[in-house]
């Protein structure tokens, strides 16, 4: 039996999640349909653009993403504490970016804009409701999936469900779980034989990061991503707001080399030993390097609702009042 959503998602806490949403019947609804010859690939850009818009207005940061032919993956950071720093007017403006009033769509520079802004900002109950929703994973996914479904149905001239039931979410408890999940997401096109290498995979965070590193123009619009640890001082020097100082627990070059090597092992069906210059990365994060490739390749099958080092899973189990979490044997194999 599937657990209730509220038991899977931490409310009012800063956390990392891996979320997956699939098109209904796993049909080729936003890729190239080999049966009919129709190409829906332009819909992938819809998803990327929408994710970027939402991440800039919700208290959500994107760590990794991959848009596949019939589903997409996101690894995101939900920052509830950041939402508490927003002023009432900022909450209203963020909400308007997502749910723009008709009068504002018609006239973005309307003279009465400030009047409505101040009126709504003075409504404490309404502001509190919007603030809570802007820091809620379910609302983020709702604001992502519903507009995409409407656009696709309008394009197809039909009605009905576009997405399968609710989205799937996995709670990532620590850096080891976060890094493993990110590598799994970034390597999805390689595993699915949609791309020979990570840098050649379209609509993925790994390709976007490599293009940025190489200082070449992006093939497509991309999502604003959480930076790696090596970029922290640079961003601090620019005096960006505190939310922009969030960074991943690894340097960019380390991560790119690790993902590139892992992708080659998965593609070629090998299980070679982790190179000496990559092994310390995994050891630092308490990941068993002998089980790394298998853990990344089969992440979606071996791990379930909660993922992390055993000691962190035990703490989470007690907090949720559960006897155990599914997937503990796979966790013990991958994480030291």
Image (cartoon, rainbow, N blue to C red):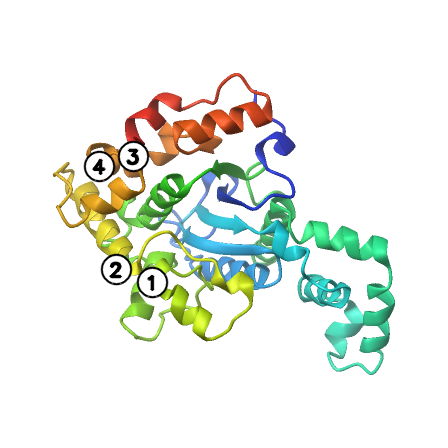
- Residue matched to label 1: 230
Give the label, 2 or 3, closer to the camera. Answer: 2
Question: Along the polypeptide, which appears first: circle 1 or circle 4?
Answer: 1
Distance of mark 2 from mark 3, alpha carbons? Answer: 21 Å
Question: Along the polypeptide, which appears first: circle 3 or circle 4?
Answer: 4
Q: Which label belongs to residue 295?
A: 3
Distance of mark 2 from mark 1, alpha carbons? Answer: 9 Å
Pointer 2 local density, CA inside 10 Å: few below 14, some 14–19, many at least 20? few
Give the label, 3 or 1, closer to the camera. Answer: 1
Q: Residue at x 77, y 51 (%)?
A: 129
Distance of mark 3 from mark 1, alpha carbons? Answer: 26 Å
Pointer 4 local density, CA inside 10 Å: few below 14, some 14–19, many at least 20? many
**336, above or below 99, in the image:** above
Q: Nearer the viewer, residue 77 or 116?
A: 77
SS label for mark 2? helix
- Give the percent coordinates (x, y) of residue 86: 69, 62
- Label 2 close to label 1 by CB (< 8 Å): yes
Question: Along the polypeptide, which appears first: circle 2 or circle 1?
Answer: 1
Distance of mark 4 from mark 2, alpha carbons? Answer: 18 Å
SS label for mark 1? helix
- Label 4 close to label 2 by CB (< 8 Å): no
- Label 3 close to label 4 by CB (< 8 Å): no
Distance of mark 3 from mark 4, alpha carbons? Answer: 10 Å
């Amino acid at each position: 039996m599937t657990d209730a959503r509220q038991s899977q998602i931490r409310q009012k806490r800063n956390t990392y999640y891996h979320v997956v949403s699939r098109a209904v019947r796993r049909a080729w609804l936003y890729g190239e349909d080999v049966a009919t010859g129709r190409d829906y690939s332009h819909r992938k850009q819809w998803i990327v653009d929408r994710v970027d818009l939402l991440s800039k207005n919700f208290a959500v940061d994107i760590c990794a993403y991959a848009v596949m032919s019939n589903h997409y993956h996101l690894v995101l950071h939900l920052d509830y504490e950041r939402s508490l720093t927003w002023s009432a007017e900022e909450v209203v403006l963020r909400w308007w970016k997502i749910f723009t009033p008709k009068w504002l769509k018609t006239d973005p520079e309307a003279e009465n804009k400030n009047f409505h802004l101040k009126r709504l900002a003075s409504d404490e109950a309404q502001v509190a409701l919007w603030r809570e929703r802007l820091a809620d994973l379910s609302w983020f996914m709702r604001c992502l999936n519903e507009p995409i479904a409407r656009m696709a149905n309008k394009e197809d001239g039909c009605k009905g469900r576009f997405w399968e039931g609710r989205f799937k979410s996995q709670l990532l408890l620590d850096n080891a779980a976060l890094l493993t999940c990110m590598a799994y997401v970034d390597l999805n096109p390689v595993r699915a034989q949609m791309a020979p290498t990570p840098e050649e995979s379209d609509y993925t965070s790994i390709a976007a990061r490599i293009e940025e590193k190489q200082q070449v123009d992006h093939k497509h619009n991309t999502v604003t991503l959480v930076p790696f640890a090596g970029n922290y001082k640079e961003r601090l020097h620019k005096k960006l707001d505190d939310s922009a100082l969030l960074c991943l627990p690894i340097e960019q070059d380390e991560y790119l080399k690790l993902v590139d090597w892992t992708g080659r092992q998965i593609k070629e069906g090998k299980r070679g030993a982790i190179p000496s210059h990559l092994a310390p990365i995994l050891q630092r994060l308490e990941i068993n390097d002998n089980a790394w490739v298998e853990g990344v390749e089969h992440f979606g099958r071996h791990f379930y609702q909660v993922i992390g080092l055993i000691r962190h899973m035990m703490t989470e189990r007690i907090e949720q009042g559960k006897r155990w979490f599914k997937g503990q044997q796979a966790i013990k194999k991958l994480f030291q």
